Image: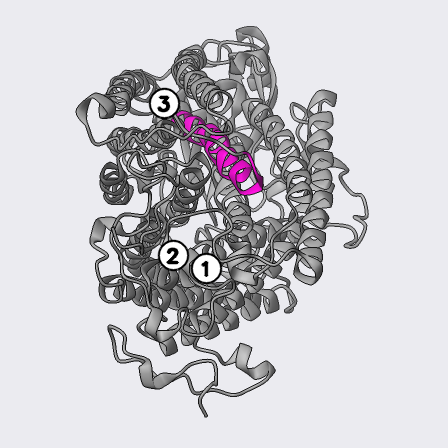
Amino acid sequence: MVEPAVDLTHHDHHHDHHAHHGPEGLLKYIWSTDHKIIAMQYLFTGMAMAVIGGFMAYVFRMQLAFPGLSVPGYGVVSPGEYNSLVTNHGTIMIFWVAMPVLIAAFGNFLIPLMIGADDMVFPRINRLSFQVFFVSAVLILASLFVEGGGFAGAWTAYPPLSANEAYNLTPLGSSLWLIAVALEFVAFLLGGINFITTLMNSRAPGMRAFDVPVVVWMIVIASILFMLSVGPLIAGAVMLLFDQTLGTGFFDPGRGGDPILWQHLFWFFGHPEVYVVLLPAMGVVAEIITTFARKKLFAYRTVIFTVVATGVLSFFVWAHHQFIAGIDPRMANLFTITTLLISVPIAELCFVYIATLYGGSITLNTPMLWALAFIAEFLIGGVTGIFLGAAGADVFFHDTYFVLAHFHYTFFPIAIIGTFAALTYWFPKMFGKMLDDRLGKIHFWGTILPFNFIFIPLFVLGMGGQHRRIYNYNHFPELSVDWMQNTRIFATVSLLIMLAFQVVFFVNVIKSWRSGEKAPKNPWKANSLEWTTESPPPHGNWPPSELPNVYRGPYEYSHPDREEDYWPQNLPA
Amino acid sequence: MIDFILSQGSSYAAGLDRLVLLILLIVGFWFLLAQSIFFGFIMKFRAKPGQKAQYITGKEKHQKRWVTYPHLAVLVFDVAIVIASFNVWYTIKMDLPPADAEIRVIGQQWAWTFQHPGADGTLDTPDDIFTIDELHVENGKTYHYKLESRDVLHDFSVPVWRLKQDAVPGRSITGWFQPTESGTFDVQCAEICGFGHGLMAARVIVEDAGQHADWVAANTPEAS
């Protein structure tokens, strides 16, 4: 049966489109091939996983602040459980929160709408991608409840610890963890193929490569980076799974294997992965700051080329995670150079964003606050990375809380600030209702201030030589002094405050959904194509006869030849 | 900067701390500059009724240089950091000054075994002293360590010495240190190694020559 919303007879778009057959009712949302529904599936799954990952952070931060305490809502945390909590917090936040929300949810929602297509080119591969992802999410959650508990060897899963159940004591948990991660990779490979092909083939008539909004470019470049880097890790995961279950010895030095081989395979993927999640967030920020500064993006082409350069360079920095792992010390010098070099394009991107604000007409509403906060906070993550990229200093900082605070200053802006920026900006388009700006600002400040109060103290603790993944610092005389314990308590209390403020966000969403002001087509007076259709867009995105044509780039704000301060891409000159 | 919290207990600790300070000054300068321009723009260019934003493409050279020059400057500072980092890295990890004595450090789940050379200063002789979770060294002497693991990855980290090195099963990794401050300090395992990782604490006891000789004499095993 054909859904009545779409008149297929006029459905003449750039590609042969699979007719949208499908079940009705609730099943429509589960079995849909509509890119917007799949985006919602990814978004809600990712946000549910974020709640779980956040709960884990709450449990282990409570244990660190008050060692041995029975944590309300959890209980006493054993050392093994502590290790499992930090392992799965990291794994879930990166693979089941940052990636599904930033790349899959917003990639799915935005790419067809922003390039003026009625859907992805491979809608059924798209649906399969989510289904595989959903299975992987179920598996990673199931792995927490099997006999022996969830995997507890850190999200990096270094063998021999991860390879041998006699060492990790989690025979089922570690295999399930590995299978879940591998399946997640499969899901994103499927999704990535779809994104790349869609951008190449389905752009609206008139839309040239440099008329594509930066966020679309960034998501597609991220997908390419992911596809190029994940192969070695999937191979490594299969080898590790064989080591775990079949008794092979790829990473077992006792049988001719090499544990450090895994580290190379993991980080060859692991470092580009940072940019895989960073780029979509940077793209989101570019869209928002141009809209609310009413400014053209400064040096659009430079941005795209810089991002490509960052992507290429990101393949040559991985061993900075392994300076003290026992690699050839000469190699560390080489990777210090490449690592510091990558600061150049990233600094360039930050400069471009700051330059974009120059001469603007800035409105500080909720999405703009999130976008600006991304820049301010990510800068801290960026500059602290220099301490770690310089091998000489990394001898001290490696695996301390300084590292932990550093990458939370990159990942938190990416996965949390970037997501809230995107959600508050596109919420009217996704759900057809305006969010409450006042509640949005309360949520913003209630998140941003505690975030800094969580992680700045952790930089200090890292300076004091506190290492990661230790469930109780009372066993170390130098680390159990009063001021350090008080600092830990301060960070934990800040986390509790930040988590409490998330309630404001959910209240805002539910309130706006039920009784919010109805969103017009283009509430922000933005230029890109998604704002030319209804909020929310119908199935097929535009009525088939009204699919947009494109006449200019997406950032023609405040053009001197025009009365209005924006110039939608689809308006004929 | 680290020395506000941790004393500089080895010959190379001060050099590493100077590198950290250099990086702090450089990135601190850039960070403050970028943030103040950033917040300055946000303050200055707030929306005012009836006033349109400027139309700046960023394509022309005279505009682009505002981004190009700073990023070239970043490159220059990167070179400075790289050179400073090389020096510290070379001293700690690549150079191996002649040793006064050797020790062996063995990690296993979840304890450290230290093999001291005894009075003769060389390992694997009958007067070797084995201890668990307690390393005795003499202040001012240069030691070569041989770092090994019996099971999974561990990491021998002595924060006051600014020393950190992974222990890899199947390998013996050689490095060095020279303690310069007497006292008792923490040894942490810095690489997750399973259930008891958080319990893998040890102590290093740096003694003056006399004390150390006494300890060696008292603990040397009887010749059998």
CB contact under 8 Å: marks 2 and 1:
yes
Whole-percent x, y for residue A423 in the image: 54, 52
- The residue labelled by disc 2 is A252
Q: Residues within 10 Å of mark 1 (few under 14, many from 20)?
A: many
The answer to which of marks 3 and 2 sits earlier in the sequence is 2
Helix, strand or loop at disc 2?
loop
Q: CA distance from mark 2 to mark 1?
A: 8 Å
Q: CA distance from mark 3 to mark 1?
A: 31 Å
The chain ID associated with circle 1 is A
Along the horizontal axis of the image, is A175 left or right of A540? right
Give the image's coloring scheme: one colour
Residue stretch rendered in magenta on the structure: A364-387
The answer to which of marks 2 and 1 sits earlier in the sequence is 1
Q: Is residue A255 above or below residue A325?
A: below
Amino acid type, callout 3 = Gly
Residue at the limit of the structure toward the bottom, as seen here = A1
Q: Residues within 10 Å of mark 2 (few under 14, many from 20)?
A: many
Report the disc number at residue A392.
3
Q: CA distance from mark 3 to mark 2?
A: 30 Å
Whole-percent x, y for residue B85 in the image: 32, 20
